[in-house]
Amino acid sequence: MSRNLPILRKFLLAAATCAAVLLSAQQYAIAQAPAGTSVPAGAFVVRQSDATWRDAVRERDVPVRVYVPAVPEGPPAPTATGTRFPVILFSHGLGGSREGGKLWAAHWASHGYVVVAMQHPGSDETLWKDSEPRDVSRNLKSGMTLKNLNLRVGDVRFVIDEVIRRAAEADAAFANVDVTRIGMSGHSFGAQSTLAVSGQKAGAFGGPPALDSRIMAAIAFSPNARNKFNVARQFGDIRIPFFSITGSEDGSILGDDTRPQDRTAPYQNMPAGDKYLVVFDRGDHMVFGGHDLGRRRPETARDREIQAAVKAASLAFWNATLKRDEAARKWLVSGGFKATLDGKDVFASK
């Protein structure tokens, strides 16, 4: 055994060095990204798995897809440097599923995040699957209710509880998670869910407080106000770092009165302090869902440009807020990100 100790020491040292290089690569990827390009895929391969988690208290099943960073050909989450991975939750839009946000989730995981994409029964794909085409719009509208928003808020709280429980029990996917660094994100109705748990107050239509103080930072893709009343009151208490991502053609989806400019209202009415907004020229609602566009409409070169920029900006935001990476923050706020944008895109921070 003693003769093998030098070999063992060399092996452990090599493993530690490898992990350090991987972590360093993802840490500085933002600062090194050339102008006009997205941040490249990270140093980690991504393992994903599907499960259904049972919330016994609410008697409700929550399907999830978990994206875990791993070393190539190795186990999840190397920890030779003592690094633990932040967690990001993703909430799909109306009629979506746990496949929502997969472009963003896989990219974040490749840069050292564990991502949990939730599916929300009652406002998920069951609203339209197996429906006659003429009934799809009506069925989707039936799911856009305050009741379902409250169920989504409950799903977020439950999933955070479950991640913490699984981390404490050294579950394979969550054994190396840092449960003190949690981010929240979502698209469309998922953006409403994100705003709610980040501190948005209920508007004229009421609803219970939904703030979850365990969430450190949030990204809303295609955000909106729950209604047009008291928007300053609705968003005035959102104190955590918050990034709103939308486009110049990101308006109504189901024939309501939502205009593209309405999706900037949350940012405009939040207090200053780590708040960010980007409006992509010619960006429509679907491009921000983080899913394959081919099943919904033909994908364009502009779509791919927007998706690349979203990957870069969202990763910079997470690195700056959840990993305290000052290089990423500087790139985001001091012109690095803006230099990659199209001339008609708008980026703002406060």
Image (cartoon, rainbow, N blue to C red):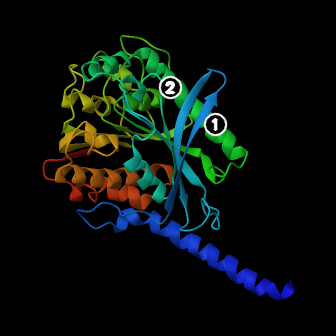
Quadrant housing the N terminus: bottom right
> At x 63% / y 74%, what residue is drawn?
15
Secondary structure category for the residue under label 2: helix
Q: Is residue 93 above or below residue 346?
A: above
From the top left corner, tell me how far across and down residue 164 is, in percent: 65, 40
The one of 179 and 238 positioned closer to us in this rendering? 179
Q: CA distance from mark 1 to mark 2?
A: 14 Å
Horizontal and vertical percent position of residue 8? 74, 81
Q: Residue at x 26, y 33 (%)?
A: 264
Local crowd at mark 2 within 10 Å, few (<14), some, or many (≥20)?
A: many
**Quarter-wise, where is residue 190 in the image?**
top left
In the image, farthest residue toward the right: 1
Is 201 located above or below residue 291 in the figure?
above
Q: How far across and down, in percent of the image, does residue 232 sit?
A: 32, 22
At x 62%, y 62%, the residue is 75
**Residue type marked 2:** Val
Q: Is residue 56 left or right of residue 32?
A: right
Residue furthest out toward the top:
205
Describe the element under mark 1 as helix, strand or loop.
helix
Where, by quadrant of the figure, is residue 132 drawn?
top left
Quadrant into which the C terminus falls = top left
The residue that mark 2 highlights is 153
Residue drawn at (24%, 23%) of the image: 254
Question: What amino acid does circle 1 point to?
Answer: Glu
Q: Position of residue 145 (x, y in %)?
A: 39, 16
Is residue 215 found left or right of 168 in the rendered image? left
**Count of numbered circles in the view:** 2
Residue to which mark 1 is pinned: 162
